[in-house]
Amino acid sequence: MAVLPTSSSNLELTISVPGFASSPITFLTTSSSSGKKLDMNQVAIEEEWMRLEEEEESNVNPRKKLRLTKEQSRLLEESFRKNHTLNPKQKECLAMQLKLRQRQVEVWFQNRRARSKLKQTEMECEYLKRWFGSLTEQNRRLQREVEDLRALKVGPPTVLSPHSSKPLPASTLSMCPQCERITTNATAAVAVDKHANAAVTLSPKV
DNA sequence: AAAGTATTTTAAGTTACCTCA
DNA sequence: CGTGAGGTAACTTAAAATACT
């Protein structure tokens, strides 16, 4: 039996048991987290589990990939929903229930947290992309409006009075500083006031 | 109580195995 | 059968947290 250290930084050793994970788990401990009541089956399970923990010291085939059974995955997920991290006692308990090494449970939780965070990041990325798209579109509209207004400035004033329908003299026109639309002096103050009170919220339609 | 050291835990990044199209 | 992609268990490393002296 070959014994191989799997890490240069510490002397942790791992063991893989062929066919070990393939047998479905048909039992669960009945003990609560506070106290343990063990029946004969439970004792056998614990002995087996302790044997596996001890065998961790020897190693036949390092880094052999384990596939978790559906039941193991289900229980791990269930546990993860309750708590994203495990204290040592919980880890031990769960490892025993799942007939896995504590290290395997620990690694599963590490990876699960990482997957969880990755998913979250991807969602945030999507959200920001949409926001960016919406802002870009808004920016395009505003640029077009600015160009239109600049074009207006070049030619003679063609703004008509709403009362007489005749062109207004340039001296009566001004630009609203907020929305950059042309207004008459009489309405400019109102326009500015309106903008001051408006709550501007930017949120993309997700 | 404060400082230094050792140990443990965690996140992040990587590697390797396995499955499936 | 060979191959590449994707998923994920397992590993490494560094930093933070905690325990111990």
Image (cartoon, coloured by chain):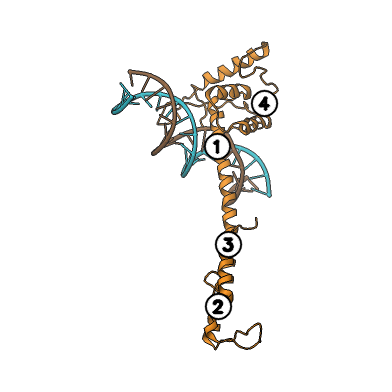
Chain colours: A orange, B cyan, C brown
Q: State how far apart marks 1 and 2 are (Cα).
A: 65 Å
Of callouts 3 and 1, which one flags the residue occurring earlier in the amino acid sequence?
A: 1
Chain of the residue that carries numbered disc 1 in the rendered image = A
Same chain, labels 2 and 4: yes
Looking at the image, residue A25 lies above or below residue A128: above
Instruction: Identify which residue, A48 or B19, lies in the foreground.
Output: A48
Q: Secondary structure at mark 1?
A: helix
Whole-percent x and y of residue C16?
42, 35
- Residue A182 location, quadrant: bottom right
Q: Amino acid at mark 4?
A: Ser
Which residue does the numbered mark 3 point to in the structure image? A197
* Rendered view: A88 above or below A64: above
Earlier residue among tags 2 and 3: 2
- Determine the chain carrying the residue at label 2: A
Up the image or down, A161 lies above or below A133; here it is: below
Label 4 resides on the chain identified as A
- Front tag of 1 and 2: 2
- Under mark 1, the amino acid is Asn
Local SS, label 4: loop
Given the image, on which type of amino acid does mark 2 rest? Asn
CA gap between label 3 and label 4 equals 68 Å
Image quarter hosting the C terminus of chain A: bottom right
Q: CA distance from mark 2 to mark 4?
A: 84 Å
Q: Chain of mark 3?
A: A
Mark 2, residue position: A185
Q: Earlier in the sequence, mark 2 or mark 4?
A: 4
Q: Quadrant of residue A156?
A: bottom right
Q: Tell which circle, 3 or 4, labels the residue nearer the N-terminal end.
A: 4
Which residue is the site of mark 1? A111
